[in-house]
Image (tube, rainbow, N blue to C red):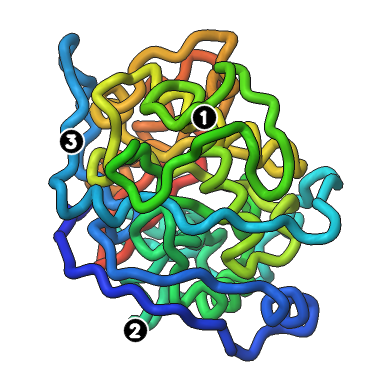
Amino acid sequence: MREREAALSIFSSAVLTRKRPAGRRASALLSFMVATAVGFIPGPRLDDGAPPAPDATVAQASPGASAISGGTAQAQPPASRQSAQPVDRQPAQQAPGSAPPRPGNETPGNETLLGNDVSWPQCNDDLPDDPAFAIVGVNNGLANTTNPCLHQQLDWADGSAGGTGQPRLALYVNTANPGLRGTWWPTNNEYGGEAVANPYGTCQGQEDAACAYMYGYAKAFDDAYLRTISEPGTYLWWLDVETGNSWSGDRNVNRADLEGMADFFHSIGARVGIYSSARQWGQIVGEVGSASSLYSLPSWLAGAHTAADARDMCSAAPLTPGGNVALTQFVADGFDHDHSCI
């Protein structure tokens, strides 16, 4: 995947006014879109799949980056939360007569149904035709922002053909753990007007596991309720874990942050997976024990360079020992292509 390019951050408040299908329009218009920013991360585009060195440490983001990698002001929840079991948004089979995309080295005799993931970098681009499944980035490159083209891209994703074990439409979110360098950091165990059961104890504003857990919980809450996503509990949410965002040098604290995100999404009935490469996951989180809520999550592995590499990567080790490799990714023709391992 492509190297990240630093960009000037421009904050502006906006309310999304985009024509939506009837089922989504009402929820979108009632939701408030938080400030957007041109960030440092153009969606899932990692370029390494090598295992981490034994003594790998987390590269801290520059002060300029960390200053805008925090959270937004605390939000209030909707009147009632989603609690239904997630809905599989995939039809039983591919639409008759449609041909799957064949980027890279795919051949007519070895066709594979491929999906695509898109986000804010593709806002002004023509998107791929007829993906088997689609994954749309909810953020604008940073964990506290909203993709300005979110609903246009959701409209595009609604046309996915299906035919794989993946949901036809899934979401991914940027993750980070900026600590006190961020624009917001939790000081207690409350968010969205509720007390949160924190497995790491009481957050008191320190850069420790208890507050990192609350930060992750808060960012997932915002992704579900402030990004104009209708029925957030029905989606599979992928956590995009990359070194381009701000992270602590303490892997245990970073793990707590991601556990907070996973626990929130699970609390609303949503499914959760992890996107990363072996090297970057090792730098940020490292080993995950069986007691962690991350342990059994599926993996979406980055780092393949061709369609054949992506197929082979299905047999690679998952990011967590209790999980499985569900997706792999490669880049061709300027787009991220995703191979289903299910």
Image point (16%, 32%), residue name: 59
Q: Position of residue 134 (x, y in %)?
A: 53, 61
Q: Is residue 57 left or right of residue 262?
A: left
Of residue 167 and residue 57, the one placed in the foreground of this image is: 57
- Mark closer to the chain start, 1 or 3: 3
Give the answer, above or below, for where 302 lies relative to 253.
Answer: below
- Mark closer to the chain start, 3 or 2: 3
Q: CA distance from mark 1 to mark 3?
A: 19 Å
Image point (71%, 35%), residue name: 195
Amino acid marked by disc 3: Gln
In this rendering, the label closer to the viewer, 2 or 1:
1
The residue that mark 3 highlights is 60
Q: Position of residue 144 (x, y in %)?
A: 43, 57
Neighbours of disc 1 within 10 Å: few (<14), some (14-19), many (20+): many
Tell me the SS state at disc 3. loop
The residue that mark 1 highlights is 213
The residue that mark 2 highlights is 124
Q: Position of residue 18 (x, y in %)?
A: 58, 88
